[in-house]
Image: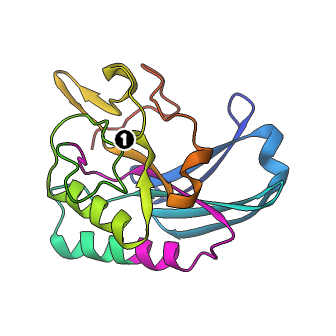
Amino acid sequence: MHSRNRKLFWVGVEEKLDGIGVFVAEKWVDSVVNVERHSKRVLILRKILDNGLLTVLTVYAPHSGKPKEEKESFWNEVFHLVSGIPQDEMVVLAGDMNGHVASSIAGYDEMHGGFRYGNRNADGSRILEFANWLNLVICNTLFMNQESQLVTYAAGTVKSMLDYIIVRQEDKAKVRNVRVIPNEECVPNINC
């Protein structure tokens, strides 16, 4: 699927109500060397960089109303996949992780940059623990941005930051900023 000089790599169910994808700018499509569709919740894309490989894991975590077992299965899968990526590859874990990492950074100083939105919930603590186990950093928390550039989900008066970009600690200096482009949707939300 092509849209605005981009190619969409997507995985999901036939009804297209669940799934994930990643848009790649057309100028970089030829440098994509591998796409692995692990499940309707995890897609891995590998792209050649000047000095090695970039591995992008795009994810869609079970939301807060899902059973604990489903969440554990998801995070175990992602843990296994990320920990299996060689250290010489740059890793970007991105997507809807359905948790709020905000609030105090106490105990999470290495993986949380201190800039935040909203209040932490149990699923946000799980994301921080995941980042801690794998020596990752949540890039959304590294930069001070306006609220409109932090909110990744808004419906009426409800606003939250559920989508994150996470990299290995040694790669955080390569990230210049993470911000939402207000009112920009690649694919409209489907309420189901």
Q: Nearer the viewer, residue 180 or 6?
A: 180
What residue do we see at 53% from left, 32% from top? 186
From the viewer's perspective, is 98 left or right of 38? left
Q: Position of residue 33 (x, y in %)?
A: 78, 63
Q: Position of residue 58 (x, y in %)?
A: 51, 56
The range drawn in magenta is 77-102
Local SS, label 1: helix
Q: How many marks?
A: 1
Residue drawn at x 52%, y 34% as measured from the top left? 177
Q: Is residue 1 visible?
A: no
Residue 89 placement (x, y as % from top left): 67, 67
Q: Is residue 136 above or below residue 95?
A: below
In the image, residue 145 sits, relative to residue 100, either above or below, namely above
Residue placed under numbered mark 1 in the picture: 141
Q: Position of residue 154 (x, y in %)?
A: 27, 27
Q: Is 80 a magenta residue?
A: yes
Q: Is residue 21 visible?
A: yes
**Up/down of 105 relative to 140, above or below:** below
Amino acid type, mark 1: Thr
Q: How is the image coloured?
A: rainbow
Q: Nearer the viewer, residue 25 or 147?
A: 147
Q: Quadrant of the N terminus?
A: top right
- Magenta stretch holds residue 116: no
Q: Which corner quadrant holds the C terminus?
A: top left
Q: Quadrant of residue 115?
A: top left
> For residue 52, which quarter of the picture?
bottom right
The local crowd at label 1, few if under 14, some if 14 to 19, many if 20 or more residues have their Cα within 10 Å, is many
Using the image as rendered, state which of residue 8 and residue 33 is in the foreground.
33
